[in-house]
Image (cartoon, grey):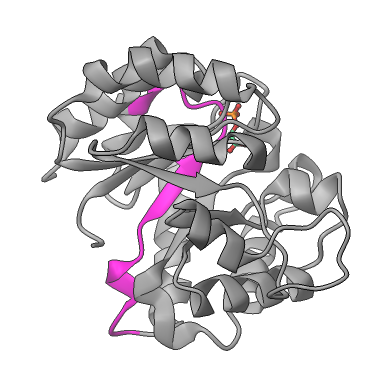
């Protein structure tokens, strides 16, 4: 773990169970035999059983887009890491900017989720990234460093079970990806922060880029030395498009 590029799809609030089955009917043959990159799809909770079933015996992994930090109890509307594991999830995305900005999740809550998910054996993709206003105020590194330190507080010794997604908020769903060299600059900074948190395990973390990744920019992004994968929203919804990104990753693997 750690050396393969991670090509991850975040479906957000898209697709029914039936549409999930249809996606994998088309997608699976397109990525059959690809094992130089890790392929992950994170569908809505309700689609997870269908996705797990549709990917049995393939090299495609399934994850969730969020979870709560308690194991069970009176938490109406929430899903626990235990439930995700039992359903066949191997990953969970935490701290996505939509969770932070639409649902008001703070670093402290995200950190509790990270701790709990790791305890239950899920791999975590922790998302960090600055808003446009923060970037324009020169706060990118300050914001990213603080999100990393607070999000990873108490789990610095488990960095080998964690991946980070750098997703500048201004690039998500806008069609305007970060310039590869600008993303690289932040990725290098993220590795420097991780290195301070745990010098032995920092290099095992894959720092993914997310925000308007498409087949036509994936190659340039993934060619940067510190971009070890991508977290793809809109372009992961179509089997053809996501498979193209997976194949770009495969071509560039072993870089
Ligand atoms: P996008 O979303 O690819 O649609 O910009 C990425 C994300 O939010 O993970």
Give the magenta range: 199-218
Q: Evaluate whether residue 136 shows in this view.
A: no
Residue 224: quarter of image: top left
Residue 166 place in picture, x, y as percent: 53, 50
Q: In this view, does 120 lie above or below 15?
A: below
- The quadrant of the image that shows the C terminus is top left
Give the residue drawn at x 27%, y 46%: 5
Q: Residue at x 47, y 20 (%)?
A: 21
User: Is residue 206 found left or right of 112 in the rendered image?
Assistant: left
Quadrant of the frame with the N terminus = bottom left
Residue at horizontal 12 percent and vertical 30 percent from the top? 33
Q: In this view, does 10 lie to the left or right of 229?
A: right
At 48% from the left edge and 27% from the top edge, which residue is drawn?
213
**Which picture quadrant has residue 215?**
top left
- One can see residue 181 in this view: yes
Which of the four quarters of the rendered structure image does ligand 1 lie in?
Answer: top right
The total of numbered circles placed on residues is: 0
Give 255 or 100, whichever is nearer the viewer. 100
Q: Is residue 129 above or below residue 169?
A: below
Against 130, is 28 above or below? above
Q: Where is residue 48 in the image (x, y as percent from the top left)?
A: 54, 40
> Magenta span has 208?
yes
Towards the viewer: 241 or 86: 86
Closer to the camera in the image, 58 or 171? 58
Q: Report if residue 144 lies within the magenta region.
A: no
Image x and y of residue 136, in percent:
75, 44
């Amino acid at each position: 773990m750690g050396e393969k590029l991670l090509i991850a799809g975040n479906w957000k609030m898209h697709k029914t169970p039936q549409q999930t089955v249809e996606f994998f009917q088309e997608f699976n043959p397109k990525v059959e035999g690809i094992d130089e990159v890790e392929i992950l799809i994170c569908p809505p909770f309700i689609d997870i059983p269908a996705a797990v079933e549709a990917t049995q015996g393939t090299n495609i992994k399934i994850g969730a887009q969020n979870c709560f930090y308690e194991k069970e109890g009176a938490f109406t509307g929430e899903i626990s890491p235990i439930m995700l594991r039992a359903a066949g999830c191997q990953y969970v995305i935490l701290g996505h900017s939509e969770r932070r900005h639409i649902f008001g999740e703070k670093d402290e809550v995200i950190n509790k989720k990270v701790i709990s998910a790791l305890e239950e054996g899920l791999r975590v993709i922790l998302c960090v990234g600055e808003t446009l206003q923060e970037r324009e105020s020169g706060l990118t590194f300050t914001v990213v460093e603080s999100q990393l330190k607070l999000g990873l507080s108490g789990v610095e010794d488990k960095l080998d079970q964690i991946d980070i997604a750098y997703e500048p908020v201004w690039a998500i769903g806008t069609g305007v990806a970060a310039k590869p060299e600008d993303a690289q600059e932040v990725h290098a900074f993220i590795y420097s922060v991780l290195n301070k948190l745990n010098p032995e395990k920092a290099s095992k973390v894959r720092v993914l880029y997310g925000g308007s990744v498409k087949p036509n920019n994936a190659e340039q992004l993934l060619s940067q030395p510190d971009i070890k994968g991508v977290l793809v929203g809109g372009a992961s919804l179509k089997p053809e498009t996501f498979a193209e990104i997976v194949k770009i990753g495969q071509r560039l693997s072993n870089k």
